[in-house]
Amino acid sequence: MLNTVVRHLRCPHCGEPLAERGPALGCSGGHSFDIARQGYVNLLSGATKLSADTREMVDARAAFLAAGHYRPIAEALVALARATADPAVPGCVADIGGGTGYYQARLMDAFPGADGVLLDISKFAARHAARAHPRIGAVVADAWRDLPLRDGTASLVLNTFAPRNGPELRRVLDPRGALLVVTPRHDHLRELIGALGLLRVDERKEERLTAALAPYFSVVASERLTRTMSLDHDALALLVAMGPNAWHQGSGDLRERVAALPSPCEVTLSVALTAYRPLP
């Protein structure tokens, strides 16, 4: 897909448009970026403050999502996109910090005329994303730096459990486009916080998110999604291994803690979905 979505990309070094040049992407400034044999391109520029997900974390996420445990989030995201995005606005569907492409693939099915560009700092996530859907092009990039996307090139931007760089999200989004953000709420996975030593979600997270994006976006729709998941021990282990809690857990200690829980275990899924429009 990179030969199709390259028209949405720009050089991370000089900002010039990228074009396909044989087995690589290049710009008029002489910068060149090889296309990996797995189908993604690495557009990282310089050092990053983010920790990229490991192969093990990405594999765990792919397995957990494939089992359908977060399907309600994907379905709610598609419904929110249909309610707030205008199909007549030209541009791509950009997923910033999109991981394996699970959520964006559902959006691609809902918007059959759109191309998708997924950015993630993990090359292992990009490998999965390059295979997630025929119309997704995967790019390794840092969400906290200047995004390697052209100005106003996206008609819809997704941000699901990922960093939010307000000025850059505003720059790459068409003035008539929509930004959809999914964040965990304070009671997300509450049954596991103490039992498995998971990180707590700040109770003011939604408030802080709105304040951080307020200079660039206005809220046009929001909803809260709460479901109960029934997870066996294997699913619980994948859930911990796929996210930031994996950095703080030893495998032996995790197995012991999971084994002490009932199977299946009832676990709360609780997220906020918010749609934004760019300010003039």
Image: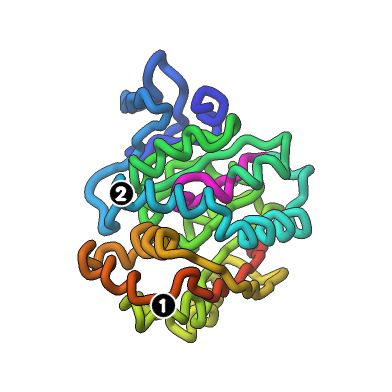
Residue at image position (72%, 36%) is: 112
Q: Is residue 280 visible to the viewer in this orientation of the structure?
A: no
Q: On the rendered structure, is 148 left or right of 210?
A: left
* Residue closest to the eye, 145 or 56: 56
Q: In the rendered structure, which amino acid carries the disc numbered 2? A: Glu
Range of residues picked out in magenta:
91-104
User: Where in the figure is residue 157, as x and y percent of width and height?
Assistant: 59, 52
Q: Residue 199: x and y, percent? A: 35, 76
Q: Is residue 273 left or right of residue 150?
A: right
Q: Which residue is mark 2?
A: 56
Question: Looking at the image, which is closer to me, 254 or 119?
Answer: 254
Q: Quadrant of residue 220?
A: bottom right
Front position in the image: 45 or 141 = 141
Q: Residue at x 41, y 77 (%)?
A: 192
Residue 128 placement (x, y as % from top left): 44, 39
Label 2: how many residues lie within 10 Å, few (<14), some (14-19) or many (20+)?
A: some
Q: Which residue is mark 1?
A: 192
- On the question of residue 79 being in view, the answer is yes
Q: Residue at x 35, y 26 (%)?
A: 36
